[in-house]
Amino acid sequence: MISTSESRHHIELNPKPYFQSKIETIAKEQNAEKITGVSVRLGALAHISPQHFCEHFIDGVKGAIAEDAKLDVTISHDIHDPNAQQIILESVDAAY
Ligand SMILES: [Zn+2]
């Protein structure tokens, strides 16, 4: 059985992963040839483990500009953060 929070993040991350489109937009804007690193922060109430996010990410960037990107995941423990429920894209490293 899938819990409510689990299914919520699946809706957010699938089928067209939010980060993939956001990363691709950034890459295009900066004329980047390749995305080499991606830093993401998981909100305290995002209900997703870094490992599980990683699985979504690897799946989501397959064949895309960020395919070989190194993923750096930070976990926030601040439940009062306005972004506590979000998965936040903090920074992107690009190669030109
Ligand atoms: Zn999932």
Image (cartoon, helix red, strand yellow):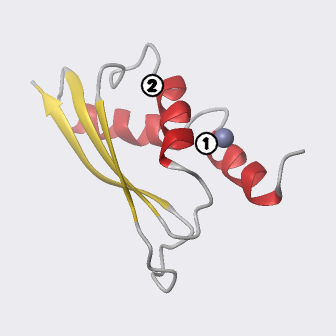
Residue at horizontal 24 percent and vertical 35 percent from the top: 37
Give the residue furthest to the left: 96
Q: Position of residue 67 (x, y in %)?
A: 36, 20
| Residue 72 drawn above or below residue 55 | below
Structural crowding at the residue carrying mark 1, measured as other residues with C-alpha within 10 Å and reported as few (<14), some (14–19) or many (≥20): some
Measured in 3D between alpha carbons, the distance from the residue under mark 2 to the one under mark 1, in whole angstroms, is 12 Å
Closer-to-camera residue (4/89): 4
Residue 78 appears left or right of 38: right
Structural crowding at the residue carrying mark 2, measured as other residues with C-alpha within 10 Å and reported as few (<14), some (14–19) or many (≥20): some
Residue 61 marker? 2
| Residue 89 drawn above or below residue 83 | above
Q: Position of residue 6 (x, y in %)?
A: 73, 51
Q: Position of residue 34 (x, y in %)?
A: 22, 22
Can you say which quadrant of the picture contains the N terminus? top right
Number of labels in the image equals 2
Is the residue at mark 1 in contact range of ligand 1, meaning its CB lies under 8 Å from it? yes
Amino acid, disc 2: Val
Residue 1 marker? none
Whether residue 95 appears in this view of the structure is yes
